[in-house]
Image (cartoon, grey):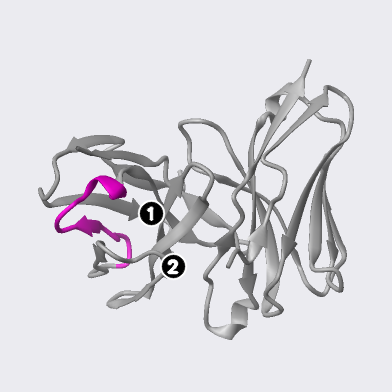
């Protein structure tokens, strides 16, 4: 089954403790992206990657890092999380009719 | 500056009637438009798209209309069903060949279909 898999689904952490949210896709897509969803703000792009070793900032990249060492994986790294990064995060890959396939989301709470 | 606007945060419709969700955009470089549907606790799922060379695209009960001169698109759902209750996001991107696939999303409209 074609899918984008994110882990973990839920995460509670403390301010300043580094964390990584993993994302993997099995569709051999070149383009992948991370979004965050916040109430009243919709989906905002954090980072995207057009291919292996090619990444670029989206609209809200501050406080985040990404890497793309292999085509299938696109982890999101928070080096020093802060409470304003409490959000619902979605990984997505692009394929077919221009549509993204999204993962199921990671709900992150930073206390 | 919000480039993709969904001005109605919520919409309630009776089952069997038409649902019309609206979306406006400001960026003239946008060339490709998509609608996504999102249920709670799930990721958004692609619903339907339209490129700027068309003014209408239909897929079953779902039709998207594009008025490029007005920078406006709408999603029509006919007939509406209770299972259509979800948040709908409008999204836009530059032409796929322009080197960027970056999607800009609206804030979403929560549709409630009342049985």
Q: Chain of mark 2?
A: A
User: In the drawing, does residue B19 fall left or right of residue A41?
Assistant: right
Q: Residue at x 32, y 67 (%)?
A: A71
Q: Are marks 2 and 1 on the same chain?
A: yes
User: In the drawing, does residue A29 fall left or right of residue B66?
Assistant: left
Q: Is residue B79 visible?
A: yes
Residue neighbourhood size for the residue with mark 1, other residues' Cα within 10 Å, grouped as few (<14), some (14–19), many (≥20) = some
User: In the drawing, does residue B60 fall left or right of residue B34?
Assistant: right
Q: Residue at x 72, y 43 (%)?
A: B8
Residue A26 - label: 1
Provide the residue designation for mark 2: A59
* SS of the residue under disc 1: loop
Query: Quick one: quadrant of the C terminus of chain A?
Result: top left
Q: Residue at x 26, y 58 (%)?
A: A75
Lower position in the chain sequence, tag 2 or tag 1: 1
Q: What range of the chain is rendered magenta? A: A71-85
* Residue A75 inside the magenta-drawn segment: yes
User: In the drawing, does residue B71 fall left or right of residue A5?
Assistant: right
* SS of the residue under disc 2: loop
Residue mark closest to the camera, 2 vs 1? 2
Q: How many marks?
A: 2
Q: Main secondary structure of the magenta part?
A: loop
């Amino acid at each position: 089954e074609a899918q984008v898999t994110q882990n973990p689904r839920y995460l509670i952490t403390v301010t300043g403790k580094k964390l990584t949210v993993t994302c993997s896709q099995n569709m051999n897509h070149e383009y992948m992206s991370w979004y965050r969803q916040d109430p009243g703000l919709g989906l905002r792009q954090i980072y995207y990657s057009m291919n292996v070793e090619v990444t670029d900032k989206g609209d809200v990249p501050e406080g985040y890092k990404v890497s793309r060492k292999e085509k299938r994986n696109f982890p999101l790294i928070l080096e020093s999380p802060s409470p304003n990064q409490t959000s619902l995060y979605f990984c997505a890959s692009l394929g077919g009719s221009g549509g993204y396939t999204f993962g199921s989301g990671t709900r992150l709470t930073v206390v | 500056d919000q480039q993709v606007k969904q001005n109605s945060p919520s919409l309630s419709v009776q089952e069997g009637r038409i649902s019309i969700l609206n979306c406006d955009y400001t960026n003239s470089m946008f060339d490709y438009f998509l609608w996504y549907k999102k249920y709670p606790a799930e990721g958004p799922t692609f619903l339907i798209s339209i490129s700027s060379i068309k003014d209408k695209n239909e897929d079953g009960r779902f039709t998207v209309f594009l008025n490029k001169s007005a920078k406006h698109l709408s999603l029509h759902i006919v007939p509406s069903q209770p299972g259509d209750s979800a948040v709908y996001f409008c999204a836009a991107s530059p032409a796929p060949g322009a080197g960027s696939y970056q999607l800009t999303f609206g804030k979403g409209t929560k549709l409630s279909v009342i049985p």
